[in-house]
Image (cartoon, helix red, strand yellow):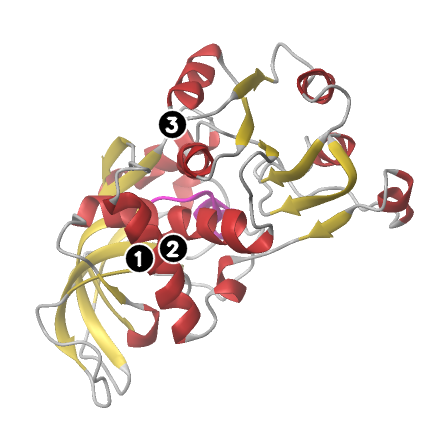
Amino acid sequence: MAKAIRISKTGGPEVMEYVDVEVGEPGPGEVRIRHAAVGLNFIDCYFRSGLYPQPLPAGLGQEAAGTIEAVGAGVSDFKVGDRVAYAGRPNGAYAEARVMPADILVKLPDAISFDTAAAMMLQGMTVQYLLRQTYAVQPGDTILFHAAAGGIGLIACQWARALGANLIGTVSSDEKAALAKAHGATHVINYKTENFVERVKEITGGRGVQVVYDSIGRDTFIGSLDCLRPRGMMVSFGNSSGPAAPFAVSELASRGSLFLTRPSLGNYTSTRAELEATAADLFAVVNSGQVSIEINQRYALKDVAQAHADLEGRKTTGSTILVP
């Protein structure tokens, strides 16, 4: 038996239950992993609330790191004792141990700790595909990144600086502004006290930015479009304020033939080669020291309801891990 978080209905943080579960033995193509640390991400809140549906009862969590305890038939890339990490579905990372498909795992370099891996796999690989694949950021580019003091945001600030880009970050407090600035943001906008569209226009001399990375959704979507220069790209990769309202496609033309994409990590790591290349790029930039992973909150797994409340209340910065 192992402790795990389960939900039998959707709703607020209170629907999560800390229960005993039977882990069992891995089947063909599976491994059993003992978690040392589990990552907390906003997508977990979407599944818990029902914004992203899944069959119930269900587990939560898409990111963790630990050690392989058992290997099922047909698994040749991993062995018992390997240090591994993962990010992505199936849900169920909020657990002391679990059986899961081996093909989602990557081996951890010796220099990457379990805590660091659990804090960065989903967020770090998300930044990798955003900055290196969805729109390949070039030296001298000016980009807008919302929620710049969050886990994804702080990684993006550092990675953009390493690429020679000018990152304009939005935040919700002066404290978060200082944090984003310290991690490489060229300019920071507190959207509680400033109009971010007007400030972006001022910063760019009226030209706008090449790309906007928007994980906020409803509250920022149209404003984000207004920050782009002609033929710029809007990358909508989250909905922390709720889904963006429907809009006419002609809005893209009237603003200068804009591009719009709604990417997901799963579509950028759908093959083994893509997963390994994305993870390797992340490991390399972290090992180089150009990107450091800021774990600013730690919660016991049993206290996950408080972790969700703090995350949704915008009380967290950087990355958060759950300790089984």
The reply to whether discs 2 and 3 touch (Cβ–Cβ < 8 Å) is: no
Disc 1 residue type?
Answer: Ala
Question: Across the whole image, how many numbered discs are drawn on residues?
Answer: 3
* Disc 3, SS: loop
The mark found on residue 60 in the picture is 2
Disc 2 residue type?
Answer: Leu
* Disc 2, SS: loop
The residues tagged by marks 2 and 3 sit, at their Cα atoms, a distance apart of 21 Å
Residue in view at x 47 percent, y 26 percent = 313
The reply to whether discs 1 and 2 touch (Cβ–Cβ < 8 Å) is: yes
Image location (x, y in percent) of residue 54 = 51, 63
Give 155 or 192, whichever is nearer the viewer: 155
Image location (x, y in percent) of residue 155 = 40, 37
Image location (x, y in percent) of residue 244 = 71, 42
Examine the rendered structure and indicate whether residue 132 appears above or below residue 215: below
| Residue at numbered disc 1 | 93
Residue 310 sits in which quadrant?
top left
| Residue at numbered disc 3 | 317
Query: Which label lies toward us, 2 or 3?
Result: 3
Residue in view at x 59 percent, y 47 percent = 237
The residues tagged by marks 3 and 1 sit, at their Cα atoms, a distance apart of 21 Å
Examine the rendered structure and indicate whether residue 317 appears above or below residue 77: above
